[in-house]
Image: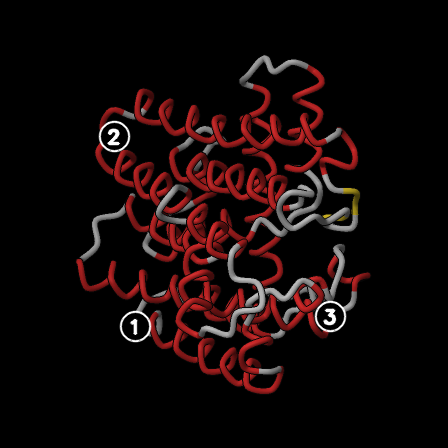
Amino acid sequence: MRDRFSIQLEYYKNLAEETLDSVFSAFNIPNELNNAMRYSVFAGGKRLRPSLCYAVWEMLGGDLSKTSPNCPIRILGASIELIHTYSLIHDDLPCMDDDDFRRGKPSNHKMFGEAMAILAGDALLNLAYENLFSLCKNNPFESQNIIKAAELIANCAGATGMVAGQTLDMNSNNSNDKKQLKEIHSLKTGMLIRASVLCGAFLHDISQECFERLDEFAKDFGILFQITDDLLDECGEEANLGKTTGKDKASGKLTYVSVFGVEVAKSKANNTAHSAKERIAGFENSEFLARLVDETLTRIK
């Protein structure tokens, strides 16, 4: 029998799927491009980022059962997921990480060609921002908070956020620099996670202290996710992960495993998980987020 956490996680995932489908239905996208975009968006992702967004919003007093697919919190979560998916499509390209598989299926460029994969990624990024602009137009009384959230998403995804992290990552091969390691992954992985957590908070009136605690939680969670990702590339099974393992080591990538080794990386993951849970310990209804930390620490995919 599934426990409360599993039911809630599936509920968030289903809401994200419904919202994403609604987003696509609202636009008349040419068939070839639409197929390439939808292929990666609906390829079986965990929907971690919208789930974080929804969970924080509910923890602070929101009720998703009273929302529609076009309400602000759901569109914010979906927009972040669209940006995340675009980044995965581009990350898999031969000129980047060069991976033929993603989530157990051929990568976008293996299915549709490199040119269409690039265009699909570009379109997903812009589709996210089109939806964010629509939110402001359709919700005038919440527009200031939505603008703050949209600005955060843009900053976290852009030239000083995720893209900056990917740039540093591409130029870090065979490095052993601990400071560079932390900088890369706080940007490449951590920034969209940070956006997910804080967007859930932007739509509530909370104190600066609470906001800062959630920000620190997001940073810890992002580091934890990356450490476990590095460990899975070294020790995980391709059947579980749905993508090629051992690529980081083979290409000389700067990872927590390459710098610290497996055992120390595991210890760092444990310490980071403990820190993340301490950040949210004072919030009511934080059980889901605490359990999500534990599940991330022990994940096999």
Residue shown at the point (71%, 41%) measured from the top left: 43
Left or right: residue 33 versus residue 191 is right
Left or right: residue 173 versus residue 144 is right
Which kind of residue does numbered mark 1 sit on? Answer: Gly
Residue shown at the point (46%, 55%) measured from the top left: 168
277 up-or-down from 64: above or below? below
- Name the mark nearer the viewer: 3 or 2: 3
Comes first in the chain, label 3 or label 2: 2
Disc number placed over residue 11 in the picture, else none: none
Residue occupying the far left of the picture: 208
Residue shown at the point (38%, 64%) measured from the top left: 219
Disc number placed over residue 282 in the picture, else none: 1
- Which residue position is annotated with label 2? 143
SS at badge 2: helix
Residue 134 placed where, x, y %?
38, 22
Front residue of 141 and 119? 119
Comes first in the chain, label 1 or label 3: 3
179 up-or-down from 143: above or below? below
Tell me the crowding category of disc 2: few under 14, some 14 to 19, or many 20 or more residues within 10 angstroms, Cα based: some
Left or right: residue 191 versus residue 143 is right
13 up-or-down from 83: above or below? below
Disc number placed over residue 236 in the picture, else none: 3
Left or right: residue 22 versus residue 106 is left
Front residue of 47 and 107? 107
Front residue of 258 and 225? 258
Which kind of residue does numbered mark 2 sit on? Answer: Ser
